[in-house]
Image: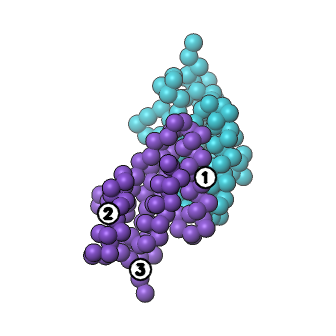
Chain colours: A cyan, B purple
């Protein structure tokens, strides 16, 4: 049983994320967002909080960091697309970045 | 006074790093290395230790993480090339990854 998001359920799930700075990645079933923080400590603090949540969910981001910037890509390899886990992790990350 | 590494000093400084999995980046004055760990917790633990050192040095990596993998790029923007700070941070990272 796949929980891959498709059709209207996908649209409904993504809407609040797309309204909050997330975008659907080009050429793959994934969502991405670029965060900017005050400095490296703020950026890495965000990553540390997100890392704890990701590990607890057993759902991990692809992400990169350069000084105060963090680029995040979320996808669910097990369903080869987006799942509610991506939406949940995206929302948690937005909470940590506030 | 730039401390940019050039000529023989650059070669001498890079030699032990190139022997230990680092490579000179293509198309830019930077060094890169791909680390692989047992799992996400080990990978992020490594990043956390490296982040502390980077912040203390005020010299920060460009890096990305996907599950148990960490890709690191080091360069010194202030000298538009490599400096002893890159060598020092690279060696510290290798120590943390052991």
- What residue lies at 61% left-to-right and 24% top-to-bottom? A9
The residue that label 2 is drawn on is B15
Looking at the rendered image, the disc whose residue lies closer to the viewer, 3 or 2, is 2
Rendering coords of residue A75 (x, y %)? 53, 33
Rendering coords of residue B54 (x, y %)? 56, 63
Q: Chain of mark 1?
A: B
Same chain for labels 2 and 1? Say yes or no: yes
The first of marks 3 and 2 along the sequence is: 3
Contact, mark 2 vs mark 1 (Cβ under 8 Å): no
The first of marks 3 and 1 along the sequence is: 3
Query: Would residue B22 appear left or right of A94 to someone viewing this image?
Result: left
The residue that label 1 is drawn on is B48
Q: Quadrant of residue B6?
A: bottom left
Distance from disc 3 to disc 2, alpha carbons, whole Å, reads 18 Å
Distance from disc 2 to disc 1, alpha carbons, whole Å, reads 27 Å
- What residue lies at 55% left-to-right and 22% top-to-bottom? A4
């Amino acid at each position: 049983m796949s929980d891959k998001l498709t059709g209207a359920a996908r649209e409904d799930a993504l809407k609040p994320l797309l309204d909050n700075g997330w975008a659907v990645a080009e050429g793959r079933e994934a969502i991405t967002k670029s965060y900017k923080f005050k400095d490296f400590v703020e950026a890495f603090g965000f990553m540390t909080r997100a890392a704890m949540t990701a590990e607890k969910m057993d759902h991990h981001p692809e992400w990169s960091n350069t000084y105060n910037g963090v680029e995040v890509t979320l996808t669910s390899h097990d369903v080869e697309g987006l799942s509610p886990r991506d939406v949940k992790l995206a929302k948690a990350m937005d909470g940590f970045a506030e």
